[in-house]
């Protein structure tokens, strides 16, 4: 079984020009290693720039282990921020993660 962390990463209320980080975890409770990658759909360059320090490098998570991804948010503009990140398991299975903040 693969156990996914929260499906929503909320940074709550932030000030303009502030930075915040969250850790998103995925647990591989299977008998084989898995590959997991976070991806930004890049549809809105302003939103993408606010997540530019997020860890988008793929991770190989060994059997019976956990992987952790750093999601970093830099508040550049005032307003409500919501975007969807995809995470892909073994280059085949696509899922979504909501990232939100209020600046």
Image: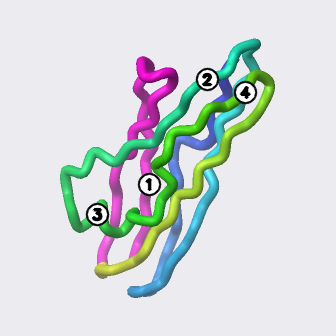
Place of residue 99 in the rendered image (x, y in percent of width and height, measured from the top left): 44, 54
User: Could you tell which of marks 1 and 3 lies nearer the N-terminus?
Assistant: 3
Front residue of this view, candidates 80 and 77 = 77
Q: If you read the primary sequence from the N terminus, does the residue marked by circle 3 or circle 4 appear first?
A: 3
Q: Please report whichever mark, 2 or 3, sits nearer to the chain's N-terminal start.
A: 2
Disc 1/disc 4 C-alpha distance (Å): 26 Å
As drawn, the residue found furthest toward the right would be 64
Secondary structure found at label 1: strand
- Mark 2 / mark 1, whichever is N-terminal: 2
Q: Which mark is residue 34?
A: 2
Q: Nearer the viewer, mark 2 or mark 3?
A: 2
Label 2: how many Cα within 10 Å (few below 14, some 14–19, many 20+): some
Which is more foreground, mark 3 or mark 4? 4
- Where residue 62 is drawn, which disc sits there? 4
Q: CA–CA distance between discs 2 and 1? A: 23 Å
Q: Nearer the viewer, mark 2 or mark 1?
A: 2
Query: Cβ–Cβ below 8 Å for labels 2 and 3?
Result: no
Q: Is residue 18 left or right of residue 23?
A: left
Q: How far across and down, in percent of the image, does residue 62 sit?
A: 72, 27
Q: Which mark is residue 99?
A: 1
30 lies above or below 20: above
Q: Which residue is mark 3?
A: 47
Give the spatial CA distance, label 3 vs label 4. Answer: 32 Å
Point 21% across, 62% down: residue: 45
**Alpha carbon of mark 4 to alpha carbon of mark 2: how far?**
7 Å
First to last magenta residue range: 79-103
Q: Nearer the viewer, mark 1 or mark 3?
A: 3
């Amino acid at each position: 079984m693969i156990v996914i962390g929260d499906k929503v990463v909320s940074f709550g209320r932030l000030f303009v020009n502030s930075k915040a980080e969250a850790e998103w975890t995925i647990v591989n409770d299977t008998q084989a290693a898995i590959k997991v990658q976070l991806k930004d759909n890049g549809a809105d360059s302003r939103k993408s720039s606010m997540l530019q320090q997020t860890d988008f490098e793929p991770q190989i998570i060994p059997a019976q282990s956990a992987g952790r991804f750093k999601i970093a948010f830099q508040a550049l503009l005032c307003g409500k921020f919501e975007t969807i990140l995809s995470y892909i398991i073994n280059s085949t299975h696509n899922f979504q993660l909501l990232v939100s903040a209020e600046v």
